[in-house]
Image (cartoon, coloured by chain):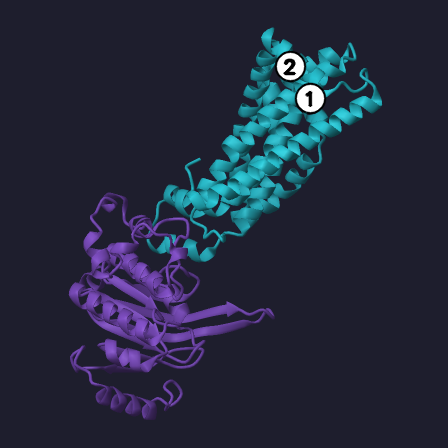
């Protein structure tokens, strides 16, 4: 988040202006739909906002958000680590790829619901089963993306590392991972989006806290305001993560590229 | 084997190296190539393009082990510095890191100042490769090769696609660096003039499948080789090795 110099700060200002505009348009469209559809079906942004404030004051919202966020973080870290390892191994070795390819396809096409239900049946209604089920849903996506990235690695740089006898760890850090940076960012981004949706499903089916549980609770009363309130609150958290964490990390990782102004 | 290593001579014997061609047949790239370079010698491999020079380098660098024959490096566990045809720097690391990261871990802390000064790279240490000209990138690749204090320096057409002035400058830098260090050098080139200016020994190769067709020792001191001398040697070589060295 370091300032990039005066030249680019005006462009940055224009860009954030556009983002604010897009948010305002979104809220206006929402308001219009609320007016057309009627309050019971579609509460207005203001009502949802009031619910968020009240629920926050009661301590409920933050508590559920924290549980969900913790599950997202745990599942994300596990899925990225395991998926990346599998992807690199499959990209590097034709044997491992041949062996694992059909497993990957099966896992990719197994619905999140099936994996979740089976995890709860086999491992019980506990936190490990919940997080494991979420991670398992994401691992094949990460593996497929990282496999593509690994196949695109430059063999010429590998030869340099070989001639100068770089250690395996140094090779990973300085030669392999920088080349996989954009693939890592892509799977991280799509990963967060997928994971938080699956976390909600997992919470709905077998947890007694978290945003998924809260939505389940309010669904039983057909309380649309509450459902939207929780959904908006969590989407906001994910937006903040994207802009405050994912994008700065990405910029830092690609700082060596020549920027065309 | 130990004796050969201790003698410091680079010995390369490639009985055969085959490639599978795109049509599925086998192509023999090297057949019965055999040469050695004494310690501290600057040797140039000269041959027609596509004859298998780069293949030979890849084999002696240990990057291609699928061949029959044997390579003995100048010392047991010899360190090798390389300049490939392309600079092959890590674009996401600075010039300094590109050099430092290739050092053995125990020497990562070495002061690289004198080396960067020697190659006129002091100003470029914190820059990224994409900000450099090809000539500078090549100098960084040379710095990387010299930093490991190599027993053997392998150069694969290090001056190709540079303009004349940049090439001349890099040629002088390479020659001086090799002379100061007394390192054994094996350089591949198809530029005979370049070879005649820099080398102690020319190893002339046949078209594919390649083998050694002649070795020439150049006794005149490096740095004291006027164009007239270079032209006359070149004309003589062109007459004796018409398939490898052209007249013009």
Q: Which chain is purple?
A: B
Towards the viewer: B43 or A46: A46
User: In the visual, does A73 lie left or right of A114?
Assistant: left
Quarter of the image for the N terminus of chain B: give it: bottom left
x and y, in percent, of residue B76 in the image? 24, 56
Residue that appears at 53% across and 24% down:
A74
Towards the viewer: B79 or B247: B247
Residue that appears at 59% across and 69% down:
B24
Mark 1: secondary structure: helix
Quarter of the image for the C terminus of chain B: give it: bottom left
Residue corresponding to mark 1: A201
Q: Between marks 1 and 2, how big is the CA–CA gap?
A: 21 Å
Inspect this view and state whether residue A12 appears: yes
What chain does badge 1 belong to? A
x and y, in percent, of residue B161 in the image? 40, 72
Q: Which chain is cyan?
A: A
Residue that appears at 37% across and 59% down:
B132
Towards the viewer: A11 or A218: A11
Q: Earlier in the sequence, mark 1 or mark 2?
A: 2
Camera-nearest label, 1 or 2: 2
Query: Eyeballing the image, is B42 above or below A174?
Result: below
Picture quarter containing residue B208? Answer: bottom left
Which numbered tag is attached to residue A52? 2
């Amino acid at each position: 988040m370091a300032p990039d110099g005066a030249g680019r700060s005006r462009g940055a200002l224009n860009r954030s202006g556009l983002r604010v505009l897009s948010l305002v348009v979104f809220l206006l469209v929402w308001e219009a739909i609320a007016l057309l559809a009627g309050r019971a079906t579609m509460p207005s942004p203001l009502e949802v906002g009031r619910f968020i404030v009240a629920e926050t004051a009661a301590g409920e919202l933050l508590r559920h958000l924290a549980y969900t966020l913790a599950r997202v973080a745990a599942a994300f870290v596990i899925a990225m680590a395991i998926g990346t390892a599998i992807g690199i191994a499959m990209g590097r070795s034709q044997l491992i790829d041949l062996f694992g390819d059909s497993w990957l396809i099966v896992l990719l096409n197994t619905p999140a619901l099936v994996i979740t239900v089976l995890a709860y049946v086999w491992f019980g209604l506990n936190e490990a089963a919940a997080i494991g089920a979420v991670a398992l849903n994401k691992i094949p996506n990460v593996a497929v993306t990282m496999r593509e990235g690994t196949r695109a690695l430059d063999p010429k740089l590998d030869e340099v590392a070989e001639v100068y006898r770089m250690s395996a760890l140094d090779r990973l850090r300085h030669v392999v991972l920088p080349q996989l940076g954009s693939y890592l960012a892509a799977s991280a981004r799509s990963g967060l989006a997928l994971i938080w949706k699956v976390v909600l499903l997992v919470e709905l089916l077998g947890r007694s806290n978290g945003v998924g549980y809260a939505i389940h609770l309010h669904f039983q009363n057909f309380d649309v305001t509450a459902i939207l309130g929780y959904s908006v609150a969590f989407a906001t958290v994910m937006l903040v993560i994207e802009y405050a964490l994912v994008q700065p990390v990405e910029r830092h990782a690609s700082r060596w590229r020549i920027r065309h102004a | 084997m130990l004796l050969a290593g201790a003698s410091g001579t680079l010995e390369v014997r490639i009985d055969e190296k085959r490639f599978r061609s795109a049509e599925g047949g086998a192509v023999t790239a090297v057949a019965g190539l055999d040469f050695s370079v004494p310690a501290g010698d600057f040797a140039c491999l000269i041959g027609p393009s596509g004859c298998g020079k780069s293949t030979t380098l890849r084999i002696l660098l240990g990057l291609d082990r699928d061949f029959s024959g044997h390579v003995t490096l100048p010392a047991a566990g010899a360190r090798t510095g390389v300049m490939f045809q392309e600079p092959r720097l890590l674009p996401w690391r600075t010039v300094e890191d590109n050099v430092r990261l290739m050092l053995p871990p125990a020497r990562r802390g070495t002061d690289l100042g004198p080396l960067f000064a020697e190659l006129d790279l002091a100003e470029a240490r914190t820059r990224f490769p994409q900000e450099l000209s090809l000539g500078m990138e090549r100098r960084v690749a040379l710095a990387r090769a010299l930093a490991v204090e190599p027993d053997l320096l392998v150069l694969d057409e290090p001056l190709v696609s540079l303009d004349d002035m940049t090439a001349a400058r890099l040629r002088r830098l390479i020659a001086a660096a090799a002379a100061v260090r007394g390192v054994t050098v094996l350089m591949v080139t198809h530029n005979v003039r370049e070879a005649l200016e820099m080398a102690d020994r020319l190893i002339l190769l046949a078209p594919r499948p390649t083998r050694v067709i002649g070795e020439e020792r150049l006794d005149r001191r490096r740095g004291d080789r006027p164009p007239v001398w270079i032209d006359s040697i070149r004309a003589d070589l062109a007459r004796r090795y018409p398939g490898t060295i052209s007249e013009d």
